[in-house]
Amino acid sequence: MIKVKTLILRAPGTNCDVEAAFAFERAGAQVDLIHVDELIRRQKSLSNYQIMVIPGGFTYGDDISAGRILANELRLKLGDEIQKFVDDGRLILGICNGFQVLVKAGMLPKSRGENSQSLTLAGNDSGRFECRWVYLRANKTSPCIFTRGINLMYLPVAHGEGKVVIEPGALEELNVALYYADETGDIRAGYPHNPNGSVNNIAGICDATGRIFALMPHPERFIRWTQHPRWTREPRRDYGDGFRVFLNAVEWAKSI
């Protein structure tokens, strides 16, 4: 059987590429780690892949603002290729810094026209880097392919600029896929359950097709049960909560 091919995009400052590659390999995909310059120079082609991933990290040192430089590269130098990738029905996943990149490249939420940015990710309300585990609840009415069959998750966050801020009037058009919650699944819970002050506890969003998904928490950091902070004290499970995100993507991409 031909495996689903996944491209993990790398740039200076990327630091979660290996974890993302491991997650997709465990889900059954063939994975290539490709530097953005290889795409810009046309040494590699997006058309050879069914899934593109922009992993976490601090691309280009988060100079100017988090994710801005890589976002500009994608929009200005690879915009046509990425648009064709999307038009061909393929999947894009942005994790943490990848969320920041997709938003600032105008690829999400795309509710107000091509490359129009109505949403951004601002500094955390706490004024500091938040690095810990949080509870999440999936939006059951979301079209998101990556969160299908998921109800609650427990995943780590690690960011300084994760607060979702959106233009007035654009919130009702937003396809929210994931919310911060407390341990009972209540999505009204405030800090520390919502680690950054995001409006409406938004942790992840997708486009109208459900094929472009971005989230601030790190599902790739909880693939094995032994990565859970209480793994020795709770009943053992086969996989960590984050694994389903990657399995959903690979299973869906088999139809492309």
Image (tube, rainbow, N blue to C red):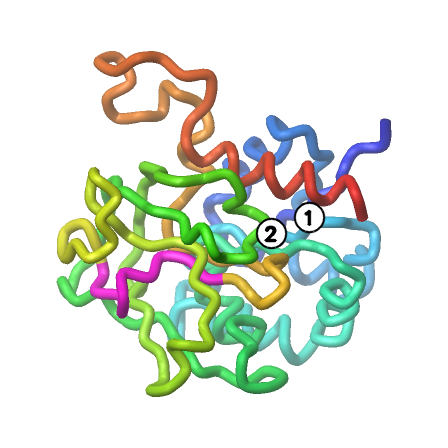
Q: Nearer the viewer, residue 43 or 105?
A: 105
Q: Amino acid at mark 1?
A: Leu
- Is residue 204 highlighted in magenta? yes
Rendered view: 233 above or below 178: above
Q: Position of residue 106 (x, y in %)?
A: 55, 77
Q: Is residue 238 visible?
A: yes
State left or right for residue 8 relative to residue 108: right
Q: Position of residue 42 (x, y in %)?
A: 81, 63
Asked which secondary structure carries label 2, the reply is: strand
Q: Amino acid at mark 2?
A: Val
Q: Are marks 2 and 1 in contact (CB under 8 Å)?
A: yes
Circle 1 Cα neighbour tier, 10 Å, few/some/many (<14 / 14–19 / ≥20): many
In the picture of the structure, the residue carrying the numbered disc 1 is 7
- Residue at position x 79%, y 69% in the image: 84
- Residue at position x 69%, y 49% in the image: 51
- Residue at position x 44%, y 83% in the image: 118
Q: Nearer the viewer, residue 29 or 256?
A: 256
- Is residue 33 highlighted in magenta? no
Q: Position of residue 123 (x, y in %)?
A: 25, 69
State left or right for residue 192 relative to residue 253: left
- Residue at position x 80%, y 62% in the image: 88
Provide the residue span drawn in magenta. Answer: 196-205
Rendered view: 94 above or below 118: above
Asked which secondary structure carries label 1, the reply is: strand
- Numbered circle sitting on residue 218: none
Q: Can you say which quadrant of the picture contains the N terminus?
A: top right
Q: Position of residue 40 (x, y in %)?
A: 73, 67
In the picture of the structure, the residue carrying the numbered disc 2 is 53
Q: Is residue 57 visible?
A: no
